[in-house]
Image: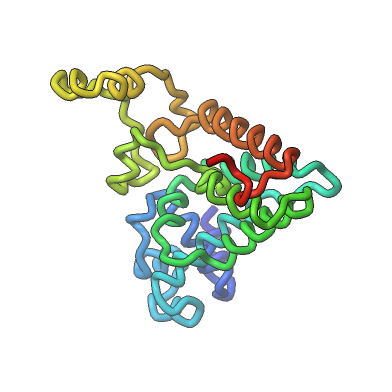
Amino acid sequence: MAEQAETLRRTPLSRDRVLRAAVALADEAGIESLSMRNLAQDLGVVPMALYKHVTNKDELLDGMIDVVVGEIDPPLPDAAWKHVVRQRILSARQVLRRHPWAPLAIESRNMATPGVLAYLDSMIGTFRAGGFSVDLAHHVMHAMGSRILGFSQELFDASRRAGRSGTTEPEPPTALPPEVAARFPHVAEIAMAASHDDGSVVGQGCDDQFEFEFALDLLLDGIERLQQQGWSSSRRPR
């Protein structure tokens, strides 16, 4: 192991090596542990050496996101659009399970990275090749939201809103205070109703595998129906 580590330290520094080392550091210790100094230490170089490959931490984070998105399976050739979309989204979800810091990192960017844009462009291309109009594809992408990238923003997920690391253990659901539950009884019963699979959660909260696929299939079935009906926003019911 020591010889392997020494070999890695002697490997010439490159942008790809820097980005992959940063991803590994975030996977192991959480995104909040990432700094140019810590990354340089892992790579066995001085911090200034990193700036030849990434100009600042924002560029580093963008590159890390693109490394992660690059792990999503490519589209299956000659397959129906619905199957392609479902399989790629579930592949994206598996990728995010390996990199639990990535959803919040993606959400934090003011602009989509080139890797994210390429993935989204490919998914839109799948819809268009499947016979979707530009109008329907536009609305479908809005409806899918972050789910197209393998995660969902949940109503009852306080930990994501607080920005906690994906390395933190999920907390069990807690009952709302009695006065709140009495005022909002339906919210209270829903918040406590489901039993969740902790092993399949991306981050924390209600986003378990069953619920994710349940919502994904609802969306895809509805989208398929609209596409078959030749739906257009100009002819939608008022």
Picture mark count: 0
Q: Give me the residue at 56% from left, 65% from top.
A: 8
Establish if 64 lies above or below 131. Answer: below
The reply to whether residue 95 is in sight is: no
The reply to whether residue 219 is in sight is: yes
Residue 197 locus on image (x, y percent)? 47, 24
Q: Nearer the viewer, residue 141 or 112?
A: 141
Q: Give me the residue at 41% from left, 19% from top.
A: 194
Residue 128 locus on image (x, y percent)? 74, 54
Q: Is residue 198 left or right of residue 232?
A: left
Q: Give me the residue at 31% from left, 45% from top.
A: 161
Q: Nearer the viewer, residue 191 or 95?
A: 191
Q: Is residue 77 left or right of residue 228?
A: right
Residue 30 locus on image (x, y percent)? 38, 50
Residue 145 locus on image (x, y percent)? 51, 48
Q: Nearer the viewer, residue 58 or 210?
A: 210
Establish if 128 lies above or below 93. Answer: below
Q: Is residue 149 left or right of residue 225?
A: left
Establish if 71 lies above or below 48. Answer: above
Q: Give me the residue at 73% from left, 52% from top.
A: 126
> What colour scheme was applied to this rendering of the protein?
rainbow
Q: Nearer the viewer, residue 151 or 121?
A: 121
* Direction front: furthest residue: 238
* Direction right: furthest residue: 78
